Image (cartoon, coloured by chain):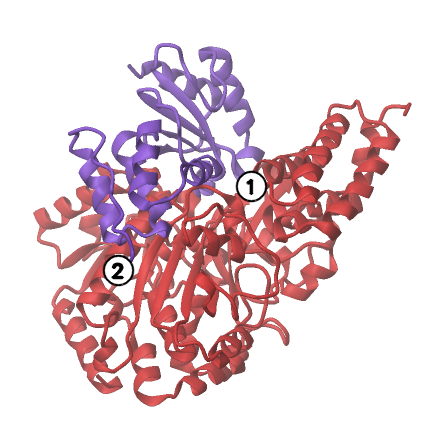
Chain colours: A purple, B red
Amino acid sequence: MALQQVRPTLPSDDKRWKLVNGTMRRNGYAGHALIETLHTVQDAFGYLDESSLRFVAGSLDLPLSKVYGVATFYHLFMLKPKGRHACVVCAGTACYIKGAGGLVDAVEHHFGVKPGETTGDDRLSVLTARCVGACGLAPAVVIDGNVLGKQTADGLVAKIGELR
Amino acid sequence: MNVDELAELAQTYRDEEAPLRHEVRVCMAASCQSSGAAPVHDALEKACADRGASCKVKGVGCMGLCSAGPLVAVADHGADLAHSTLYRDVKPEDAADIAASVDGVPVERLRCPTDQPFFARQQRIVLENSGVIDPESFRGYVAAGGYAALVKALSEMTPAEVVQEVIASGLRGRGGGGYPTGLKWSTVAKMSDVQKYVVCNADEGDPGAFMDRAVLESDPHRVLEGMAIAAYAIGANKGYVYVRAEYPLAVERLTTAIRKAKRSGFLGSKVAETQFAFEIEIRLGAGAFVCGEETALMASIEGLRGQPRPRPPYPAEYGLWGHPTLINNVETFANIAPIIRNGGAWFASIGTPKSKGTKVFALAGTIENTGLIEVPMGTTLRDIIEVIGGGIPGGKAVKAVQTGGPSGGCVPAPQLDIPVDYDSLKSLGTMMGSGGMIVMDETSDMVDVARYFMEFCMTESCGKCVPCRAGTQQMHGLLDRIARSQGTARDLALLEELCEVVQATSLCGLGQTAPNPVVSTLRYFRDEYERKLVPGD
C-alpha cells in the first residue's frame, strides 16, 4: 500500500501562496512541475527565499538539494530581493558591438553598482541580459519592464537618476 | 471536417471583413512596441473612427524593418506587404494624416518605399502572414488559408504520406544543425512506443538572433499547425513548446493561440472532427543558453537542471521521460504547413541543390537596415549585406559578418560572394546557425569579439563536463590577456591547443563549438592577434 504523502501547510496566510499551490495542483504535484512552480513563486514574490524553496520541495516531494540546485542553475531565478527599480542592460552581440559595455560602465561609475548588484538604499538593481531580442534598437536597456532603444551613456544615467 | 468545409469557413471569415475595404496595419511585435507602437495603434483607431474611414485598424506582426519602427501599412484586404503603402517612424501625432490618406493620397513625408531591395528581394514563405494578419485572431489565420494543411493531412493523407512529403521537400533543420527533417520524422515514426512526444524548440538563446521570437509573435498558429501535422505523421498525442521566459510577448500570443485553437477544435481530443488527438503545453525556460541543446532542453521540461547527456541514444529513440521524441525548431515547424499545402516538390524547387527553401535571418550590428529578412537559400552574403541590408552606415567598409552566434564563426569581407547555404558556410569554418547575422565594420576589434563570445560560453557552460567547464575559463583568460596586450606567443599557442582539445572532448554542442569564434577569427585575422602580443614567455 502506498503511503499518502502529507503536503506541508502554507508558510503563511499570504494569498500569493494560493497561486503557487494552484500551479502545483494543475500539474498534479508532479516533480516535473518544479520549474513552472518556481516561476510562479518568483512572479508572485519577486524572488525565491528559503521558506518558499522548502515549501515547494515539500509539496512536490523533492529533496531540498534538488530544488536548490535547479533554482541556482537557471540565471532567471533570483535568491535575493531586487531593488525598487530594475535596469537590465542588454549584452547581446548587436548591443555589445554598438556599445553596451559603455552603458554598464557608466551606470557603475555613477551609481556604484555592478551588474547583479543592488544599491544600498534598495532603489536600483542593475542586471545584464543575454539578448532581449530588440537588436534593431541596439544598444537596448530594459527599465522596469519597458524596453528603451538606441541608448547613450549620458541619456541612460539621466533616466535612471529620475527614478525614485 | 474536410478541405472544402474549411475553405468555406475561411470564405465566411473573409466576407465578414469585406465591407471595410482597407486595413491600417500597425506592427505590434516586440521591437516596434519598444519604439512606441501601442500609442500609435490607439491614436490611429481614434482617428479612423473620427473620420468614419472605411478601414479597420489592425495590430499585426513583424514587417521586418525593425530599425524604422514603429511601422504602419495601409493596404487592401489580404494584400501582402509589397502591395501596401508603408510608413516608417510613425508617431501618434501622424494618426490623423494617415487616417485621411486611407481614401486619398499617401502621406509622402512618412513613406517607406516597398519597392526597395529590402522588401523586393525577399521571398516570404515562413513570414508570409507576418505583418499581414492579426496574430491574436484565430479567424484571421483561417481566413489567410491557415489550418488548411492540417485538414488536408488528416483527411486526405496517411501519416506515411505526410512523412514522405517532408522527405521530398528536402527541408533541413532550421535550428542550425541542418539535419534532414524528413529523416528525423521517419525515425520517430518507426518507433513502436505508444507514447511519443513532439517538442518545439523555441529557446532562441543565440544573442543577436530574433527570428523565432518574430515568428511566434507574428504567426503563432502556424507553429501549432506544423506541430500538429508532425504529431499526426509520427503518432504523438502530446506536444511541448519550450520557449524562453525572456520573450513575454511571444509566450502571451502563443498561450492565446493554443487556447483559441483548442476552443475551435484544432487542438484537443478530436482535432478537426477526426479521431486524431493532440494537446500542446508551453514550458518556460529560465535563462540558460545550454537548454537550446536538445537533451538539456528535455531535462529542463522534466523539471531538472538543464544539463545535456551523451547521445546516442538520440531523443528520437529515448527522449522525454524515456519515450520517442521529435524535436524541431520554430522555423522548421513554420515551414511544414506550406510544404503540405503546396507539395514537397514545390518546396524543393526553391534554394540550392542541398539546401532547399528559404531562410529567415536577423540582420543586426552596424548595418543600415536592421531587421528580419527571408531569402531563398543560396543568396550571396554580399546581396544580403550590401543590397538588402543597405550596406554599412557612414560609408564604412564591411570587415566581417558573424553567423551562428557563439557557436559559429565569421565570414571576412573578401569572401562575401559565397552563397548562403549549410555547406558553403561550413566550408568557410562557420555555420548557418539559427539565422543571426551580425555585421561588423572596419572599426571592430576581432580579438575583442572572440573574447566576448568566449565570455558568453564560459558563463553559459553548464558545468557537467570538464573540457567545457575548465576549458572555456582558461581560453577566456588567455584571450583576455591577449586583448589587453599582455599575452605572449606562448599564450597564443596554448590558446590554439586548447581550442582543439575543447572541440574534440566536450560532451555537447556548447563546448564542442565554443572555440569556433576563436578558430575562425584566427583563420582570417591572425595579424590582429599577433599585433597585440608582447615578447617573453
Name the residue type under label 2. Answer: Ala
Answer with left or right where residue B231 lies relative to residue B97.
Answer: right
Name the residue type under label 1. Answer: Gly
Which chain is mark 1 on? B
Which residue lies at the image location 36% right of the left edge and 14% below the top edge? A161
Answer whether labels 2 and 1 touch (C-beta < 8 Å): no
Residue tagged 2 = B257
Which chain is mark 2 on? B
Front residue (pair B82, A42): A42
How far apart are the two marked residues, 2 and 1, measured between alpha carbons? 32 Å
**Front position among marks 2 and 1:** 2
Q: Position of residue B139 (x, y in %)?
A: 20, 67
User: Tag 2's secondary structure?
Assistant: helix
Q: Position of residue B469 (x, y in %)?
A: 65, 39
Answer with left or right where residue B280 lies relative to residue B441.
Answer: left
User: Tag 1's secondary structure?
Assistant: strand
Residue tagged 1 = B365
